[in-house]
Image (cartoon, rainbow, N blue to C red):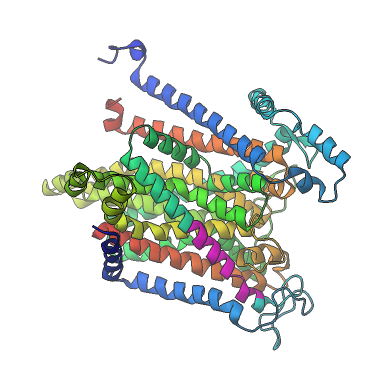
Amino acid sequence: MTRSGGASGRRHPIAAYIAKRIGSGLLVVLAEAIVVFAAVSFLPGNVVTAVLGRSVSPQGAALLIHQLGLDKPWPARLVTWLAGFLRGDLGQSLAAHESVTSLAAPRLINSTILALSALVLLIPFAVGVGAYTGVRAGHWADRVLSSVTLTLIATPEFVMGSLLAYIFGVSLHILPAVSLFDPGTGPLGEPAVLVLPVVTLVLVNFGYSARIVRAGVAESMQSEYVKMARLNGIPERRVVWRYGLRNALAPSIQMLALTAQYLIGGVVVVETVFQYPGVGLLLVDSAGTRDIAVIQALAVVLAAIYIGVNIATDITITLVTPRLRTSL
Amino acid sequence: MSAASASRTLISYVSRWRSGRVTKVGVVLLVAVVGLALIGPLINTSSPTAFLGAPLSPPSRDLLLGTDILGRDLLSRVLHGGITLISLAVLASVAGTIVGVSAGVLAGLRPGRTGQVIMRAVDLLLAFPAIVLLLVLATGLGPGPTTVVIAAFIIQLPGAARVYRAATLEVANLPYVESARLRGEHGLAFVVREILPNIARTLAADTGNRFTVSVLLIASANFLGLGLQPPAADWGLMISENRPGLYQQPLGVIVPAVLIAILAISVNMVADSLARRDESL
């Protein structure tokens, strides 16, 4: 049956599905690039006065407009910019007098180290607590933890980060309150600078992640097949491991993806709190100096990663869920 | 159902909402912190922008919390610093709810081309991380309170539109909605009389979520320097301003941080129990 019907019928349905998801993802990235370009180009904020100050001379303004290419019509600018993207040329930073690529590359690595450390620490923690409370839904441990997670979800990153910086950086004096490190060796040369930013990200996201896993486990523990397994006299421990937890795999993958997506935004704020030299701090600094080329490029790169995570998740969930896989 | 009975439904819904322990704690904290923010500017302290002492001086009898990084009265800045955050968040939530309900109901009632266009726009907005969208808008519009409200408004639109579209789809085929349509009711009158009263429960549950999102985003934007500009007194802005003085005068960071945390957490507690009330109905 898999080989029948239509022109695309020659390909494997899963391969066709993957190709379709990636194709539509690329279209979304293109649409987003256009939205970013439009937002930065057409909204009324005045770049020239933002960059050069209010007392700028007409000649100075004209020179800057020419340098930025703003004197060309917008469709030409959009096409030049998009074409540059395809060649890996993200534009020139106005403030740093450097190409955006060389400016952002080391910072992208720093941010990736930060985000991955948070992810690696968070996943076992969230899955463990989520599964523990999910199996015991309604039990006192579940209720206590749900108040804790509700509190953590609502605490903004910069508040959590500032409080941790005070407690561990100033009061106890055991960790650096500001993440300064040698750009040559990177954050791994001085792992202590990573601790507070990573802990902030983990704590702020933990409540949310644990809740997703808990909901998945609690739902499968209520299901008909768990009831059947119990009625068949299968020992409770085996019911939990074999039927309850295994079917919570899909929500856990969902949680992993949502966490990864959260981290893309979360690092922006946390890097600012700790002055950690990553791509998020670069974005915030560039918004302050109106460094349009940097913001445009990084916004599209971050949005593309965000969409990439989304697509990878959808594909993984489809592959590990038999019901979804066979319906393709 | 008339508009009057719709508001009666909403009121009776809210009054039937029995509060658990978490809800009670949430309401008490929320009233306390919002009360402080609203009454604060009326308390006759010194000006929040006047320079009254040496920078980062510790608490004293005259200046109960000491001074901030520029030598301004910290207590006065704390008392003045909450009202803008709360009013900007209310503004963004109200705007987000109104437009979100309109877009969602429209997409639900017209699943054809109109609905498709709306949902594509929703998908596109959802594909941006919120903070990135905020930074892009701040670049286009320039930093300031207006920018932050517009950003918070746009960022919550997709979520709101989805929720209200789903709620509309659920009620659109109910027998009495169907019979109203067969009677020839249509347009705005149809929406007001038939759809809105039936999604009022969703509205009550979702408004809390809208406000939570707004508070978190606007506080973060002010912290990042994209919203209110110095010398304005604002809790989020105070945290970033006083951050370099964390060692000498930690109160400049801790007091606003704790207040924002209490505000955000209590709003979330109340929103969560409103949403759960909706599920259990």
Q: Front-most of A195 and B37?
A: B37
Q: Is residue A243 left or right of residue B258?
A: left
Q: Main secondary structure of the magenta part?
A: helix
Query: Going 67% across and 30% down the picture, which residue do you hit?
Result: A74
**Relative to residue B58, is residue B193 depicted above or below?**
above
Per the image, is A194 magenta? no
**Relative to residue B231, is residue B177 depicted above or below?**
above
Residue B150 lies, in percent from the top left, at 56, 52
Residue A187 lies, in percent from the top left, at 67, 47
* Residue A127 in sight in this render: no
Q: Front-most of A317 and B281?
A: B281
Q: Residue furthest bottom?
A: B61
Q: Residue furthest front?
A: B184
Residue A322 lies, in percent from the top left, at 28, 31
Per the image, is B82 magenta? yes
Q: Front-most of A53 and B29?
A: A53
**Relative to residue A178, is residue A35 depicted above or below?**
above
Residue B38 lies, in percent from the top left, at 54, 75
The quarter in which the C terminus of chain A is drawn is: top left
Query: Going 50% across and 74% down the picture, which residue do you hit?
Result: B33
The quarter in which the N terminus of chain A is drawn is: top left
Q: Front-most of A179 and B279?
A: B279
Query: Going 60% across and 41% down the picture, which residue do you hit?
Result: A112
The mark total stands at 0
Stretch of the chain drawn in magenta: B77-93
* Residue B19 in sight in this render: yes
Q: Is residue B54 left or right of residue A300?
A: right
**Relative to residue A45, is residue A31 depicted above or below?**
above
